[in-house]
Image (cartoon, helix red, strand yellow):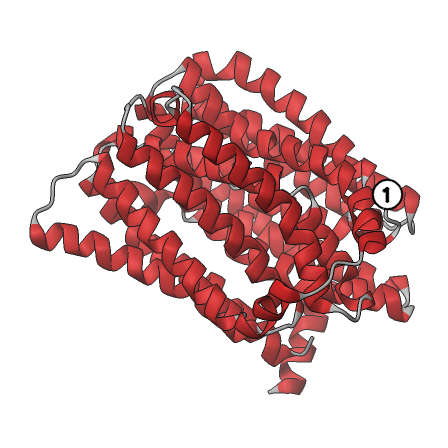
Amino acid sequence: MNAKKIFYFAIGPIGAAILGLITLPIVAWIFSPDDIGRLTMLNVAVGFSLLLFSLGLDQAYVREFHEVNDKPGLLKAVFLPGFMILVILLVCLGFSPLSPSLILFDIDSFFINFLLYAAILLSFGSRFLSLILRMQERGLAYSMSQLLPKVIFLVLLLGYLWLGAEAIFDNLIMANFLSTFAVFIIYAWNARKDWIPALTARINMAKQSEMIRYSIPLIGSGVAFWGLTAMDKLFLRGLSSFEELGIYSIAVSFAGVALVFQAIFSTVWAPVVYRWAAEGVEPEKIKNVMDYVTLAVVLLWSLAGMFSWAVPYILPPEYNKVQYILLAAIAFPLLYTVSESTGIGIGIKRKTMFSMLAAVVALIVNALGNWFLVPIYGASGAAMASAVAFFIFFTIRTEASSKLWVSFERFRLYVFMIWLVMLSLIINILRLNDFFLVVLYFFTFMLCILFFKKQIKEVIICGLERF
């Protein structure tokens, strides 16, 4: 994938992050922390549905894309099983006395239930449609499909302000639903030449069975990974309050700026590295990418710490502790990004059981951490438990990849990751003042430059040559 294509893939996440930074304070000033907490539970439910009902076949699609000629048949084979199960379940829920909105939001509403079911179905379809654009390396279309819904959500919020609409959860979930619907329509239009032929394509049953065998461990790891990312929110919902959940959600949203890097890297990395593996590229080339990813992650985490003092100036007073929480919450996207590079040997060797092992062990650690820390520290406790759990997740994937595929140097990697996780825990417990925060993270920033001076020099030289 050349620089132009990478740039096209980057437009969406970068633009979405910028819009998110604009939208986040608006949401915080309009809606209560309780309603923001309820919106978080909606995202938790949708995320669980995607991970469970995709049956791991979305990852099988990525793995087999370059090795299968019948692309429409491949798409149909991976989409249909999970979609049928999901539709049957939602129909049964619709006729049952259970009210998911009451369980999730403490609001018994047919309207909210309907929007919840629709959001799940639309998100499921968008997930598979986005894979088409991603694997075809259609970066601009992929980015626009991510960017335009954020614009729509922002416009709706501004419309609420202009019209003086009531700041209630119904309006917040409606804005979220409309942006989700926009995602689906845009993806469907951009991928129409691929999904329309899939409607009449024949499924290769032997290949589908092979992919199901490949994806079975991924179902367990997918559910475990959902639990790993949602456990903090579930414990805050059960052991704390919607207010603490809302504060935590705002911190996670700020930390989500790091998802720009994670989204760009994950989107580009999987198709490229599997193509390299199929072409027999030297492992040294892949290991070099790991060093660059580690460098970028440490620098981003350090910059977040150096500028976290600015967060309280753009949020209402009830969100003051967000500046501390986000330094632990940022562990999820950054440690996950590192593990995507260092754990690539698991995918290359098709040993997906180790991905499930990493997710399950980290899930247990996260559950125990939340159980002990949330009652004491609230949102800060949830962030600390999540940071430790993702460090465990990253470590297991890294060590498994090194043993299964090719051994690689890991000393610098562990030194910085351990230091940054420990620092985030100390900060959330002691609440250090802004001066010490800046000093500690500036020290980390400079130490990273010293340890990775070779990689930095190569980046500078490469940039000058291109210029």
Tell me what residue is drawn at x 61 percent, y 52 percent.
297
Decide: is 218 above or below 235.
below
Residue drawn 41% across the image and 49% down it? 307
Q: Name the residue at 36% across, 58% down.
A: 150
Residue 285's x, y, as percent? Answer: 83, 66
Q: Is residue 13 above or below residue 82?
A: below
Quadrant of the rendered image containing residue 246: top left
The type of residue carrying mark 1 is Lys
Q: Which residue is under mark 1? A: 351
Query: How many dots with numbers?
Result: 1
Q: Is residue 315 visible?
A: no
Q: Quadrant of the C terminus?
A: bottom right
Give the quarter of the image for residue 238. Answer: top left
Q: Position of residue 440 (x, y in %)?
A: 52, 41
192 relative to 277 in the view: left or right: left
Q: Residue 434 at what x, y percent from top left?
A: 38, 38
Q: Is residue 272 above or below residue 414?
A: below
